[in-house]
Amino acid sequence: MNKGALVTHSGGCHCGRVRFTVQAPAELEVLHCNCSICNKAGFLHLTVPAAQFKLLSGAEVLHDYQFNTGTAHHLFCSVCGVKSYYVPRSHPDGFSVNVRCLDGGTVTGMRVSEVDGRNWEQQFPQGRGHYDQ
């Protein structure tokens, strides 16, 4: 993630039941992953430590989908089906927010880097990604 002053970004799912805030720079560095689930969902990852994420509403409508190793918690709104954030395998102590689910007005720029999630073990040989990617 880009080192810089943190601002509060707000976001949520399509129907608005799931709402959150995330502390991150205004100029974002995000990852585009080609793994099976991210590719189909069009997820753009902004990964932050748990302390920088706050769920404001919608816990009661979230459903958890797990597959493969069962480490990641893919949380999606049971009303509209949007996965606006989740607990990633690479950072089980943090959150990955879908930048496409952020409200407008706080992001001043974005740099997207590719990550080879199809070959996850080779991409992350230590078993985890890094918050500073």
Image (cartoon, grey):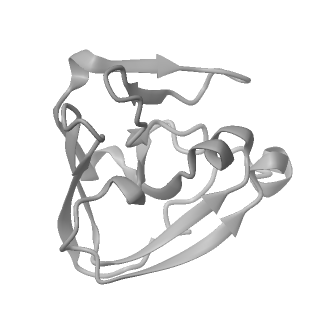
x 49%, y 60%: residue: 131
- Whether 110 is drawn above or below 35: the answer is below
Marks counted in the figure total 0
Q: Nearer the viewer, residue 50 or 42?
A: 42
Q: Position of residue 47 (x, y in %)?
A: 45, 55
Q: Position of residue 71 (x, y in %)?
A: 60, 26
Looking at the rendered image, the quarter that the C terminus falls into is bottom right
Q: Position of residue 13 (x, y in %)?
A: 30, 40
x 73%, y 23%: residue: 68
Q: Nearer the viewer, residue 119 or 51?
A: 119
Res. 31 image quadrant: bottom right
Looking at the rendered image, the quarter that the N terminus falls into is bottom left
x 34%, y 53%: residue: 101
x 19%, y 31%: residue: 17
- Whether 74 is drawn above or below 31: the answer is above
Q: Is residue 108 left or right of residue 119?
A: left
Q: Position of residue 76 (x, y in %)?
A: 41, 28
- Whether 24 is drawn above or below 102: the answer is below
Res. 48 image quadrant: bottom left
Res. 93 image quadrant: top left
Q: Is residue 46 left or right of residue 10?
A: right
